[in-house]
Amino acid sequence: MPNDSKAKLLLSAFEEFAKNGFFGASTRDIAAKANINISSILYYFGGKKGIYTAALKNIVNVVNDMTADLTAQYQVVQKSENQSDAARLLKDFMQRFLMIICSETLSIDMKKVFLSEYSCPTEEFSILYDELIRPFHDKISSLLHWASAKKIPLKDCYFYVITLFSTFFIFISREDNICKIMEWDKADEKVLDKLLTYTNKQIDFILSAFSQNSKK
């Protein structure tokens, strides 16, 4: 029963934080939605900040679990620095990230909390950054570096990866407008395939540009 109460509070917290953000969220409303005494939030989490921290750590754990197989493959490529393997895994990572952030793989509330914290960071942003965003960014940047046979400096790769991620973040935050302009249906599997194709073309263009430059 205690674990059920804690899980219910965390689920309710996601809903409240997704709707009102950290500063607008109310522990009273979180407890009421979970139908649990408000004192339980203090007992299990130490207060509003503690339950928000738990929500962010939950996102980190879920996403890391969803990418564990790719992380294992990354460790293999990290040893070999094989160019073709790095290029393939780079695209696999981007596809997985697209599915996580733009599909229903994560709950709507979890995605809203993630995007809210990413765009308007609180003091707890370091949880997402240190345990999820930075490690993910490091892996993608290194893969791009190896896929280019190290022709693209690693520091430049960090910048290129930002532009790749931006495509997904812009889409999910402006989904209705973009779908209307592109005459797409709501973000279904076909639309996500188009986004992935566009992203892969960006990657191919970057690699091709540096490959051609090295031949001159």
Image (cartoon, helix red, strand yellow):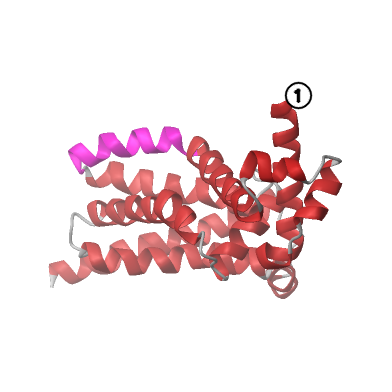
Residue drawn at x 62%, y 47% is: 46
Q: Nearer the viewer, residue 153 or 201?
A: 153
169 sits left or right of 30 in the view: left
Number of marks in the image?
Answer: 1
**Is 54 contained in the magenta span?**
no
Q: Kindly state the secondary structure of the residue where label 1 is placed.
A: loop
Q: Residue furthest top?
A: 1
Residue drawn at x 78%, y 50% is: 30
Q: Nearer the viewer, residue 25 or 112?
A: 25
Residue type at numbered disc 1:
Met
Query: Can residue 49 be seen in the rendering of this structure?
Result: yes
Query: Can residue 108 be seen in the rendering of this structure?
Result: no
Q: Which residue is labeled 1 in the image?
A: 1
Task: Classify residue 210 by image quadrant.
Answer: bottom left
Q: Nearer the viewer, residue 2 or 198?
A: 2
Task: Classify residue 133 by image quadrant.
Answer: bottom left
- Assign the magenta stretch its main secondary structure: helix
174 sits left or right of 196 in the view: right
Instruction: Residue 22: give x, y in percent of width and height.
Output: 66, 63
Q: Quadrant of the N terminus?
A: top right
- Residue 119 versus residue 133 in the image, above or below: below
196 sits left or right of 7 in the view: left
Instruction: Residue 100: give x, y in percent of width and height.
Output: 58, 47
**Is 77 contained in the magenta span?**
yes
- Residue span colored magenta: 67-81
Instruction: Residue 15: give x, y in percent of width and height.
Output: 76, 52
